[in-house]
Amino acid sequence: MLAVGKKVPASLTGILVGDGSPTKIRLSELYKKSPLILYFYPKDNTPGCTTEALCFRDNSAALKKAGLSVVGCSRDNEKSHQKFREKQNLPFPLLYDDTGKITEAFGVWAEKSMYGRKYMGILRSTFVIDTTGKITHVFEKVSVKTHALDILKAL
């Protein structure tokens, strides 16, 4: 997993699903103007991921006031991200990791286990990235109900 003080690889790209049509974008474009909260979550429209997204949505004004932008990232496709954003009225974009390179570079694509079954998936984690591309904070094993507030307290 990328650690505090490390630089985000400059070549990473994904598909940004926001208010307009989905767009291929360099990750560096997302933190160029303001520090970025990049949170990784396993799956759109699942209970834990929805709770986490709603926590960011409900605290978006406070995060914006603190000068932070928010982007959620998973390996769900563009259509899934669009439905999730619309259904939950999310005011921030979601990033589709179409190649898997973003989740792998951040070290959040890993073997998981549920009920004795092992599988590959995204570890719920969050990175705060400054405008130079340096990671300033890493949050692992987050509480989905209070995650945005926990970030505000830590910053």
Image: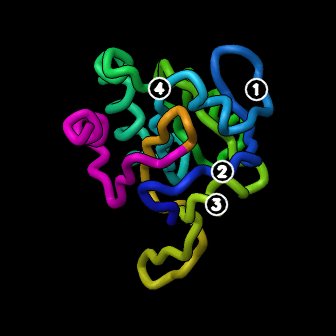
Q: Which is in the foreground here, disc 4 or disc 1? A: 4
**How many numbered marks does the figure carry?**
4
Crowding around mark 1 (Cα neighbors within 10 Å: few <14, some 14 to 19, many 20+) is some
Q: Secondary structure at mark 1?
A: loop
Q: Secondary structure at mark 4?
A: strand
Amino acid type at image mark 4:
Ser
**What's the CA distance linking mark 2 and mark 3?**
13 Å
Does the CB distance between marks 4 and 1 fall below 8 Å? no
Which part of the image, by quadrant, shows the C terminus? top left
For this view, does 146 lie left or right of residue 98?
Answer: left
For this view, does 1 lie left or right of residue 56?
Answer: right
Crowding around mark 3 (Cα neighbors within 10 Å: few <14, some 14 to 19, many 20+) is some
Q: Secondary structure at mark 3?
A: helix
Amino acid type at image mark 2:
Arg
Magenta span: 134-155
Q: Which residue is at 49% across, 33% downward? A: 36
- Percent position (x, y) of residue 64? 38, 18
- Percent position (x, y) of residue 109? 59, 65
Q: Which mark is residue 42?
A: none
Which residue is nearer to you in this view: 110 or 11?
A: 11
Q: Earlier in the sequence, mark 4 or mark 1?
A: 1
- In the rendered image, residue 144 lying in the magenta stretch gets the answer yes
Q: Earlier in the sequence, mark 3 or mark 1?
A: 1
Does the CB distance between marks 1 and 2 fall below 8 Å? no
Which residue is nearer to you in this view: 36 or 75?
A: 36
Amino acid type at image mark 3:
Ala
Q: Which is in the foreground here, disc 2 or disc 3? A: 3
Which residue lies under the disc numbered 1? 22
- Quadrant in the rendering for residue 61: top left
Which residue lies under the disc numbered 4? 69
